[in-house]
Each structure stands twice: as C-alpha cells, then as structure tokens.
Image: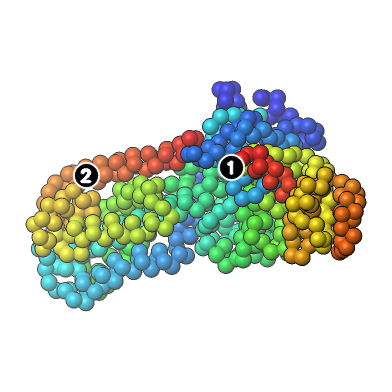
Amino acid sequence: MSTATMTLSNEQIRRSPAHTATIYLKEAKYEFLKYLRLRMYTVSVLTFPIMFYVLFGLVLNMNQFIAGVRVPVYLIPSYGTFGVIAASLFATAAGLAADRGLGWLEVKRASPMPPFAYFTAKVFTAIVFSAVIVLALFALAIAFGGVRMLPTKFAALFVTLVAGSIPFSAMGLALGYFAGPNSAPPAINLIYLPMSFCSGLWVPFIFLPKVVQKIALVLPPYHLSQLALGVVGSGTHEPALRHWEVLGAFTMICLGVARIGFQRDQEKMYG
Amino acid sequence: MVATLERMPDARSVTSQTVAVLEDVNKSYGAVRALKAVDFQVRAGEVVALLGPNGAGKTTAVKLLLGLLQPNSGKVRVFGGDPTNPENRMRTGAMLQVGRVPETLRVREHIDLFSSYYLNPMPTSQVLAASGLQQLSDRKFGELSGGQRQRVLFALALCGNPDLLFLDEPTVGLDVEARRMLWDEIRQLVRRGKTVLLTTHYLQEADALADRVAVINKGEIIAEGTPAQIKAQTAGKRIRCITSISLETLRRIPGVTEVKEDREAFELHTGKAEPVVRELLARDLNLSALEVTAAGLEEAFLALTQESSKNGN
C-alpha cells in the first residue's frame, strides 16, 4: 500500500473529535447496559461481596475488633477489594473471550469501529460496577454498621478501591486473550478465588498461616487491600508507595500479555 | 488510486468496474489449504454468489476481502486498495456467521451503536425497514428467533449504507419463509445499486439472487458464469427406467456419464438423451417406467464438484 493511499484514506475517514467521542461513549454505554441486564453477571458480582459483608460484618461480628478497628470498618476494604476484582475480571475476561471465540469481535473488526473504543468500554464497565459495589458497602456500613468516618476518608477509600479495578481489568484483558469462550469463567474463578483467600480478603491477613502470608506478598489483591486498609488505619504498615509500585508493575505486565494476545490474534490472521 | 476513489460514486453504472479482487490467492490454515490459487472478481452493481459445499473456502474468501485474514500469497484488493483501509471499512458492510451476539441489547441499540461508527450512516428507520425489523426494534437480541437474528446481522451490515456488501451464508439455517423474506430484502438493496457478494451452499439461492455464480470446491473455483451458463456447462439429462440390463452394461453405454441404482430403477446421467434411450430400448424390450428430465442446477453442481474431487484425487 502506498503512502499516498494511506494519507488519502485517513483524510477521507477523518471523524470530528466530537464524533469519535460519541463512538467511545456509545460503546461504553452499551457495554455497561449489556452487563447490567445480564443477571448472571450482576447477581454473582454484586451479591457476593455485599452478602459476605452483611453476614460477617453486620450480623456476626459487628462489635469485635480486628487490627485495631471494628469489624464493620475492617471488612469494607477486604470485601471492597474482593468485589472490585470480581467485577473487573468478569467484565473484561469473560466478555473478551466470548467475543473473540464466537465471532462477534470479527463483525466489529469488519466495521470501522476504533479498536481502542472496544477495550475502553470494557474497562469503563468494570470501573462503574466496582464503584457501585464500594458505594453499596459504604451505605450498609453507615446505615447498619454504625461506621463513622470523615468524608475525606470515605473519599480516599473509594478512590483507592475503584482505582484498583484498573490492574484487574488489565489482568482480565490478558486472560480474555488466552482463555476460550467457555473456559474463561471457570478460569477466572480458579484464579481469583484462591488468590482472594491467600491475600486475606476472606480471613483477615493477620489470622492467615505464616506460609500463606508469605505468598500474599506477591499477590496483587493483597496490595490493593492493604492500600485500602491503610486508609482506615489497619494495614500492615508497609509504605503505601510499595503497594502502588506492585500494582503498577502488575498492570504493565498484564497489558503486555494482553498485547501479545492481541498481536497473536492478528498474526493468526496474517499467518 | 486517487482517481479511482473519486470516480467511484458514479461508476456504479459501469458494470465492468471491478470493486473487489482476489488475484492468485493462496491461504492455508496450518496444513489445510483453504484456498488454492484463487482468481475472483466482483464488479460494481452485480450480485455474485460464491457457491460451494461446507468447507469449500467460501468464508475464507469473504474474510480475506474484509481484511480479517491475510493471504499467504497473492493479492487482495477492495476498491483498488488494501481491504483493511479505514476508507474501505466505511464503504463495505459485512454479515458474518456469528456464534454469539450480545443478547441483552435491544435491536435498535445494536443498530444505534453500529451506525455511530460511520460518517454517513443509513438512517435507523431505513435500516429497520430494509431488514424487516420495524416491529422488533425494542426486542432484545436473545428474545429473537433464528430468522430474526439473521435479519439483525443483516441490518448491522447495512448501517453504514455501504456500496459493497458481503453476506456470508445469509440464510443458513432459516426456514423457507424466512429465507424468501431475506431474499426480497437483498433484491431491494440490489435495486438501489449495491454490489453484493454472497456465499451460499444453496443452489436455489444462487440461482434466485445472483447475476454471476462462481462454484468453489476444496479451495478452487471450478466454474464461473451466469446461473444459466453454469447449467449449460453440464447441460445434461437424467434418464430413469426399470430395466434388466446390468449396472456394468449400463455404464458402458456410450455417452453415459453416471449410473445410480435408485430403489427398483436405474438413474443415468448423460449429455444427450436420445442415443442412450435408443440403445436402452434396443437392449431391453421389457424396459419400463422410462423418464427423461433435464438435470437442474443441483445436478450441475453435483457434477461439477464431483468432477473436481475426482481430478483432485
């Protein structure tokens, strides 16, 4: 293809920035709607962290203390992290694997859709559902757990947890490129459930066996939950920067893997 | 290049204008050769059917022309350029075979999203009308029947108001009524000057819709022409009769290309019926239930594909 052709083509299809923004918005809106109406997604992703929080934080251990804070406070970062991970992985990996494996992504690729819009829509959906889960936990904590914190603390906790959906969305994209349409959901469960346990999201970190505590140090959910626990003053007191570094590196690795998958898909087509 | 692009809008009436080309294209998946040295063209304003059995390479050809696959060798051109050009994606529409479409989105939502990708989309009301989906626009995809789902995929191919449409097995799995409905919709598009490449393994469909048919089998184009020409190429007769003549003897009668036992009768294929009938009657005075019919496109197709298989082996 000559350079002249390329230039001409690009000029001919140049969309206005407003048009491009509209595409990104619609892609994100419909991706969100798609999952909102998918009961399998909303029920499993929203219900579990909320149910666990109500059961273990409000019904059973409400007036006990862990690591210097009351249980209803301690469990917001824990189940918040748990919820954010599930919402992010299922919104990205499961959908991407199905779209790739069952032909839908080809229909989109045959259209002039900007490819990046497809990925940002998935990450957007993951972030919105993560935010919903965190806000639901806040509401329960305030209404039934007697949790009182400064609004700035709530805000910091919210931002930390919701930002955590970015590394796990990246992980989901990587997974989505290497899992089949049917194997993606069980693969997600096989990875994130043990990972959540070992990171202290179900059993508080300080109660975990020593061996598991050592494993936790290399697990991203541990670092996200410790960042969030740090906000409420019951983390393991490592410097926050360290956690951000680990999560940042994890995000980059996952995006790298996703990129390899993306290119492998292209090469399969170019091979 | 520049000239081609600028001339295209009014060039649709010039039937010799080539809009899509496969030139000596080879494509393999591992050890499987999906296309072997395929030469194929689509000209502006025509409806071309790529006709062949499952696994013949039809879908591969379409995906190459959509830039979803790249050939191992040979040239693929659409509107004179690379099929992956954004410009080309704006001017082509594709209906592919899809295993799963997001089921929780409504018909009009799917159309709204796809239309947003294009600079000059077809108005939604027109897309709905052209695909017969007006009554169903508020339904979720998952609530639709097989035929209705196919029509949504058809509608998505129309969203960009494309000049060139690729329809990969548009009516596969549809009942007769749904198939005819989609045929009518395709015919209406053709009347509006669209160029259509459709793949099918239904001969009737190629016959009903196409100006030109290319028969493809095992990755090779084995015949090309108007539906009438394809029939003429193997213009044969089918002779059916009950006779005591043995199968071996029947096979040796000059002009007989094929003999099949069909229940109590034999079925013979031949280029010219009269000499064979004369020979049959001469050999068996008690011959009964004689029928002579013209071989349809179905037979032509079978003859063509079987011939190419024999040559291949």
Q: Report x, y in % for residue B278.
A: 91, 51
Identity, as a three-letter code, of the amino acid under mark 1? Thr
Tell me the quarter of the image containing the N terminus of chain B: top right
Which of label 2 and label 1 is nearer to you?
1
Point 45% across, 57% down: residue: A32
For the residue pair B246 and B276, the one nearer the viewer reads as B246
Secondary structure under tag 1 reads helix
Secondary structure under tag 2 reads helix
Task: Please report, as a chain letter, where disc 2 is located.
Answer: A
Label 2 Cα crowd, 10 Å radius (few <14 / some 14-19 / many 20+):
some
> Which residue in the structure is indicated by mark 2?
A246
For the residue pair A119 and A157, the one nearer the viewer reads as A119
Could you tell whether A143 is left or right of A109 in the image?
A: left
Could you tell whether A208 is left or right of B2 in the image?
A: left
Numbered tag placed on residue B60 in the rendering: 1
The vertical placement of B105 against B279, above or below, is below
Point 57% across, 40% down: residue: B34
Q: Quadrant of residue A145?
A: bottom left
Identity, as a three-letter code, of the amino acid under mark 2? Val
